[in-house]
């Protein structure tokens, strides 16, 4: 695929190290979401005064992405499916809270995925590729495409890592959900997926000169791993983009003034029972 140098080839580790929230210089969609919710918390994260941790759900999601979108070389290089060392007395794996398991983890150079989680990941990936429209979105293109801009609309360096870019369809993001997929549209609203998609779309537009559509492939985390494809309406992304732009401007103002509010400086009125 010819991309006119829109994308750069860096691995996931280097990408995350470049984010403002990890001590880097680039605003990411995740950083922008933190800034939108609570600028003060984001400031503390930037200064290294809050731990940058990853939840089990996010770790599972990363593994799902890798196995579904990069199932051979990348998966084998990054992941090991294992339940850890076996206790000879019981014939079962040592518990994750034991010293034996901690020693096992310390000796690994790859991320560990349990056999239980891998069973889910296999079923979810198969379901994604068996879904006609999801398969069509993923039939051509490339995974994990990174964009970096040294200067954005408000002089804030920015970066995005798109799950999948299909030159014919546009931006494709893979999401897992523990809920019934019938409620995924609500989950997309609750988790601010439109802001993320709008951020990706804008950076890609600034690089390519074209405003690409944005799709979500959602897959349930329980059998039968139902899959749905969702597309953002253009006006929804336009609204999210406008809010992203205001948040970037607020960040620039906070950075220049050194004042990052919590958004709870004033008394809040509770006016509903």
Image (cartoon, rainbow, N blue to C red):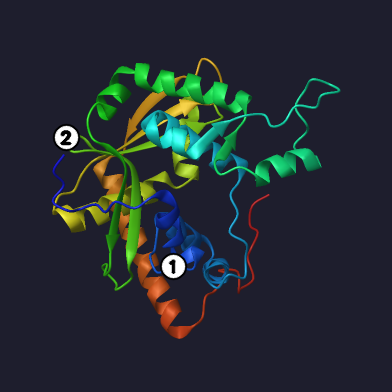
Q: Quadrant of residue 221?
A: top right
Spatial CA distance of label 1 from label 2 is 33 Å
Q: In the image, which is nearer the foreground, mark 1 or mark 2?
A: 1
- Crowdedness near tag 2: few (<14), some (14–19) or many (≥20) residues, C-alpha within 10 Å: few
Q: Which residue bears the numbered disc 1?
A: 24
Q: Residue at x 34, y 58 (%)?
A: 159
Q: Quadrant of residue 2?
A: top left
Whole-percent x, y for residue 108 in the image = 61, 42
Q: Which residue bears the numbered disc 2?
A: 168
Q: Which mark is residue 187?
A: none
- Which type of secondary structure does the marked residue at label 1 adopt? loop
Query: Can you say whether 69 is above or below 240 in the image?
Result: above
Q: Residue at x 56, y 44 (%)?
A: 109
Q: Is 141 situated left or right of 118 in this image?
A: left
Q: Is 95 situated left or right of 11 in this image?
A: right
Q: Residue at x 32, y 68 (%)?
A: 157
Q: Residue at x 39, y 29 (%)?
A: 72
Residue 252 appearing in the image = yes
Whole-percent x, y for residue 161 in the image = 35, 49
Whole-percent x, y for residue 263 in the image = 55, 69
Query: Can you say whether 254 is above or below 10 in the image?
Result: below
Residue 95 versus residue 209: which sits nearer the camera? 95
Specify which label sits upstream in the sequence, 1 or 2.
1
Single out the residue that lies furthest toward the bottom: 257
Q: Is 210 situated left or right of 261 in this image?
A: left
Label tally: 2
């Amino acid at each position: 695929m010819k991309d006119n140098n829109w994308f750069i080839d860096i691995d996931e580790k280097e990408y995350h190290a470049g984010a403002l929230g990890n001590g880097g210089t680039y605003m990411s969609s995740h950083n922008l979401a933190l800034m939108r919710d609570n600028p003060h918390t984001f400031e503390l994260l930037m200064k290294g005064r809050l731990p940058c941790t990853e939840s089990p759900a996010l770790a599972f999601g990363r593994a799902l992405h890798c196995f579904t979108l990069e199932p051979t070389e990348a998966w084998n290089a990054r992941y090991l499916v294992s339940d850890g060392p076996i206790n000879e007395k019981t014939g079962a794996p040592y518990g994750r809270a034991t010293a034996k398991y901690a020693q096992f983890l310390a000796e690994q150079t790859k991320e560990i995925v349990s056999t239980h989680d891998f069973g889910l990941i296999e079923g979810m990936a198969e379901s994604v590729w068996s879904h006609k429209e999801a398969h069509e979105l993923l039939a051509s293109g490339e995974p994990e495409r990174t964009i970096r801009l040294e200067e954005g609309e408000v002089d804030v360096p920015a970066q995005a890592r798109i799950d999948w870019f299909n030159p014919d369809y546009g931006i494709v993001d893979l999401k897992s959900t523990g809920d019934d997929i019938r409620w995924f549209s609500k989950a997309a609203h609750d988790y601010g997926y439109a802001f993320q998609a709008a951020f990706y779309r804008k950076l890609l537009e600034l690089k390519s000169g074209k405003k690409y559509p944005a799709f979500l492939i959602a897959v349930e985390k329980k059998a039968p791993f139902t899959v749905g494809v969702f597309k953002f309406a253009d006006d929804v992304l336009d609204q999210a983009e406008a809010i992203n732009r205001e948040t970037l401007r607020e960040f620039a103002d906070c950075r220049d003034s050194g004042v990052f509010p919590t958004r709870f400086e004033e008394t809040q009125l509770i006016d509903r029972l």
